[in-house]
Image (cartoon, helix red, strand yellow):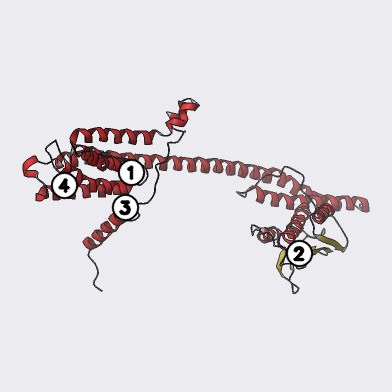
Amino acid sequence: MKPRSPEYRVAVDSLRGLRQDLFHDAFAYRPLPRRSVDGRIIRRLPARLREYATWTPHALIAVAALITLLISGVDADDAVLLIVPLTVIPVLLTMIRPVAAFWASMVSTPLAAMLGSNWGEWPWAAGSFACHLTVLTVVAMRTRPRTAGWMWVLTALYALAADSGIGPTYLYGTNSGPMLVLSAMILLCVTVWHIRREAVQEVTAQQTVTAHERSRRTLLEERTTIARELHDVVAHHMSVVAIQAEAAPYRVENPPPELEKAFATIRENAVAALTELRRVLGVVRAEDYEAPDAPQPTLADLDALLANVREAGLSVEKAVTGAVRELPQGVELSAYRIVQEALSNSLRHAPGATARVEIGYVLGGLGLRIVNGPPPNPSLIKPSPGAGHGITGMRERVSMLNGEMTAGRTDDGGYEVTVFLPVALPDEDDA
């Protein structure tokens, strides 16, 4: 296939724009909206007048239609009843069907000129002259600048055809020149108004985005400063405490067991504090961090959670294996949240089912297993749709603690979530 020339593509694009602006959905219903009450002038008016002031655009178009009516009455004799609708209806039509109003003005122009003209000019009679200028102005304001350009081009083509011998220009002369000059000036002003309004809107939107990004950047900088100070001050001193607690028993000859145990406890607490501090610093540096405003729950609060779930209608039982011991706060909180989210999913997606929570304290970590059976009457009880972020949130918590997690359907149609959260042994070297 032979490639098209650039001129051909420009012509095709232009015709496509013409069809889209003035032919596609030309008679679409597009009512003129009322003015916003947030305008600089309207918002200063009393409340009673403010309601009426929102109809200002409609009132202006009605006044323009009245002026066109008066001009048409001067321009017509016995045919006034026929000329008036031809010049007034297009103006009023701009309030509901703007593109159709332009075509109505183009069609009514030669009809009104042939019915009577006391100006002695062609092709726009007095009423049609005012009508067409009004329609061009309103339609250009309600559409985009490209539409205004096409309307002026079609107006110029009509004027050229009318001045080429179709009408009695040899008797009355022509007023195509004034029409084209005035309409070009009006449409140019409307186009500049369009461009300025879009520029103001773009600048306002950009300023809003810039202000938001500036405040966000300031917040991140403050949080980064806090995190750096915490690391430089607290982490340093806690590291010194841990090292000194580990070395202290070797500086005393034959230390008593109680002293060794005390120093070992100090070191364990210091290492645990350092681990939690690193985790907190990572959260503080995150962009979506929100500081908690209440004490965070632990596995000791699971009984209250299970009681609430039972009151909500889920039959759940708990089983604990292994030696129950105190775990780091981050592990306790994540385990609690994982159980909470898994039971919430059971309530949401398997209403009426039974569930089981298994907690295993094993060497080197904590194991969790939350499993629920299928809903008893899936055809009668419709599961509640969720946001779809529950499993993702659990995986993020597990990943933060370097744990492992699996989730999936069981053979009987239920759902199972298994999690292992590693916990460092007290005698491991975390320094």
Q: Amino acid at mark 1?
A: Leu
Which residue is at a point 80% across and 64% down the rendered structure image?
354
Residues tagged 4 and 3 counted as in contact (Cβ below 8 A): no
The label shown at residue 159 is 4
Residue neighbourhood size for the residue with mark 2, other residues' Cα within 10 Å, grouped as few (<14), some (14–19), many (≥20): many
Q: CA distance from mark 4 to mark 2?
A: 83 Å
Q: Amino acid at mark 2?
A: Phe
Which residue is at a point 58% across and 44% down the rendered structure image?
220
Helix, strand or loop at label 1? It is helix
Q: Reply above or below: 379 against 185.
A: below
- Marked residue nearer the N-terminal end (4 or 2): 4
Instruction: Please identify the quarter of the rendering in which residue 228 is found.
Output: top right
Q: CA distance from mark 4 to mark 3?
A: 21 Å
The label shown at residue 21 is 3
Q: Reply above or below: 397 against 129.
A: below
Residue 355 is at least partly visible in this image: yes
Q: CA distance from mark 2 to mark 3?
A: 63 Å
Q: Which residue is mark 1?
A: 93
